Amino acid sequence: MKVTLEKRGNVCWIIFNRPEKLNALDKESWSLLARNLRICDNDSSVSAIVLTGNGRAFSAGDDINAMFELKNGDEALEFFTTLYLAVEGLVELRKPLVCAVNGLAYGGGCEILLFCDVVISANDAKFSIPEGKLGLIPPMAISVGYSMLGRAIARLALTGDSITAEEARNIGLVDIVVPKDYLYQEVERQLEKISSIDENSIRTIKNWLRIEKEKIRRAVMELALMSLSESAKKRMEEFINRKRKEGV
């Protein structure tokens, strides 16, 4: 299963589970993420959700091979509608969401952090929003990221720079940085704090913090169109060939 769901006590753990692909997100992965979020959010016995990755990555973002293989508008629309439904699930969550960044968080994997309530990162994690290098756009970063993080998100989107966990904390993308061996211990510590908050308070807080979805939807649909452009196809093919040569 590319995205697994484990219930540990009253906490749902959603785990990206394609370690051999650095947890890259194809259509099935986005669909499973949306499904698992819905299951957890609708379970009255669940008090919080943790999102993390298996292996050395949180998520490398969208699966470039899957995007490169999109042949027409219908296929692109299906892929990116599936992506948007997962993002919509993140936006509409009524339960607190803790993200445990166990390794690199690139592209969509980095953008997902914008929708987390608490982001805890291993100190060796790396973060990047490199979609522009592939002739694409980072839809969540450009639609809602600027209002959250200001100019820092613009720099990441326009340069594709990779930054450290400490830098990510300094710009507000990450809340807490800990040594890798203590990542999940810190998750449990934050979950314990969340459990002390009244459920009605949590529900009201989450409702007031909810992000406007329409801008995200429009950006995702624009990405769907851009993914079919000649420029994007050429850059994605170059990226795929380079990774093959590197044995990645």
Image (cartoon, helix red, strand yellow):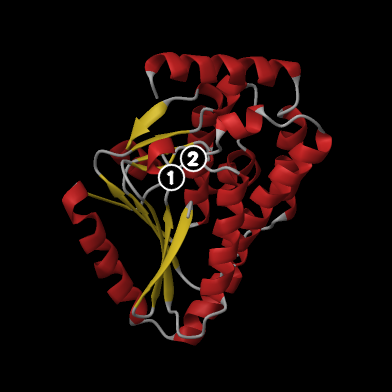
Left or right? Give the position of 128 relative to 32.
Answer: left
Q: Is the residue marked by circle 2 packed among few (<14), some (14-19), or many (20+) residues within 10 Å? A: many
Q: From this view, report whether residue 6 is shown above or below residue 242.
A: below
Measured as percent of width and height from the top left, residue 223 is found at 71, 35
Q: Nearer the viewer, residue 52 or 241?
A: 241
Q: From this view, report whether residue 27 is shown above or below residue 87.
A: above
Quadrant in which residue 233 is drawn: top right
- Closer to us: mark 1 or mark 2? 1
Per the image, the residue denoted by label 2 is 24
Q: Nearer the viewer, residue 20 or 236?
A: 20
Measured as percent of width and height from the top left, residue 13 is found at 40, 65
Q: From this view, report whether residue 8 is shown above or below residue 229.
A: below
Identify the residue at image location x=64%, y=22%: 135
Q: Earlier in the sequence, mark 1 or mark 2?
A: 1
Measured as percent of width and height from the top left, residue 107 is found at 51, 36
Q: Please tell me the numbered disc located at residue 99.
A: none
Q: Is the residue marked by circle 1 packed among few (<14), some (14-19), or many (20+) residues within 10 Å? A: many
Q: Amino acid at mark 2?
A: Ala
Marks 1 and 2 in Cβ contact (< 8 Å) = yes
Per the image, the residue denoted by label 1 is 18
Residue 137 in sight from this viewpoint: no
Measured as percent of width and height from the top left, residue 237 is found at 60, 17
